[in-house]
Amino acid sequence: DDFTRCRLSQQKERTLGIIKPDACGKVGQILDAIFQSGFKITKLKMCQLTRNEAFEFYQEHQGKTFFDGLISFMTSGPIVAFELMGVDAINKWREVIGPTDSCEARKGAPVSLRARFGKDNQQNACHGSDSLASAAREIEFFFPSVAAVRQNTAKLCECTCCV
Ligand code: UDP
């Protein structure tokens, strides 16, 4: 019924966002935009990915032509990873960051973060999880649950900022 639909549609979701190495000088402006868009930032950290970590994070893209370039780019400097919470957060954050290619983003909705802060279809300023399943995996990747840390199965432990 309407009441149930309304309640379901108001359910909060969590998603994983990243400010990529090319946009780390714009952290202030990007966090400001996140706040203005109504998200809660429930976790956040700055770190620099190792190649192994970047490989694992982007495993679905292994074998693609842009994979090697993507790994080099994502390990080239610090990143800021964060968990966002809000109604329909996964789709909403994808809308705020805009299309993958920053050049395309500037033609379409010039207010998106990739339009404002990205350069091209590789150096595109921000990442956002694209589904419930990837959000769960990616949040666990950057912010391992206490259980995973206790069992020593947490993956993100080689990172230079965390040791
Ligand atoms: N990427 C790239 N070249 C391409 C397509 C993508 O370097 O032709 C990079 C870009 O940084 C992108 C990431 O790979 O954000 C992941 O690609 P995906 O298709 O999943 O785009 P997204 O979900 O990030 O918009």
Image (spheres, rainbow, N blue to C red):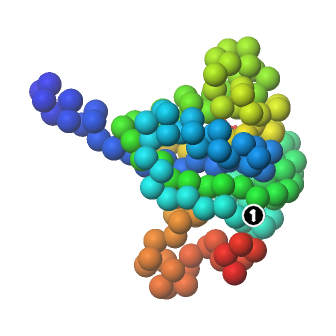
Q: Position of residue 16 (x, y in %)?
A: 54, 50
Please, is residue 8 above or below residue 147 in the view?
Answer: above
Mark 1 secondary-structure assignment: loop
In front of the other: 5 or 45: 45
Res. 121 image quadrant: top right
Q: Position of residue 128 (x, y in %)?
A: 59, 42
Please, is residue 25 above or below residue 99 in the view?
Answer: below
Quadrant occupied by the N terminus: top left
Residue at the (50%, 53%) spot, across then down: 83
In front of the other: 76 or 57: 76
Q: Is residue 50 left or right of residue 99?
A: right
Q: Position of residue 26 (x, y in %)?
A: 72, 42
In front of the other: 154 or 39: 39
Q: Is residue 27 left or right of residue 7?
A: right
**Label 1 Cα crowd, 10 Å radius (few <14 / some 14-19 / many 20+):** many
Q: Is residue 150 left or right of residue 26?
A: left
Residue type at mark 1 is Gln
On whether ligand 1 comes within 8 Å of the CB at mark 1, the answer is no
Residue at the (72%, 76%) spot, across then down: 158
Give the farthest residue toward the top. 107
Residue at the (66%, 55%) spot, across then down: 80
Res. 38 image quadrant: top left
Q: Position of residue 27 (x, y in %)?
A: 67, 46
Count of numbered badges drawn on the protein: 1
Q: Is residue 34 visible?
A: yes
Which image quarter has ligand 1? top right
Q: Is residue 149 left or right of residue 30?
A: left
Mark 1, residue position: 48
Quadrant occupied by the C terminus: bottom right
Please, is residue 48 above or below residue 114 in the view?
Answer: below
Res. 53 image quadrant: bottom right
Residue at the (56%, 76%) spot, across then down: 154
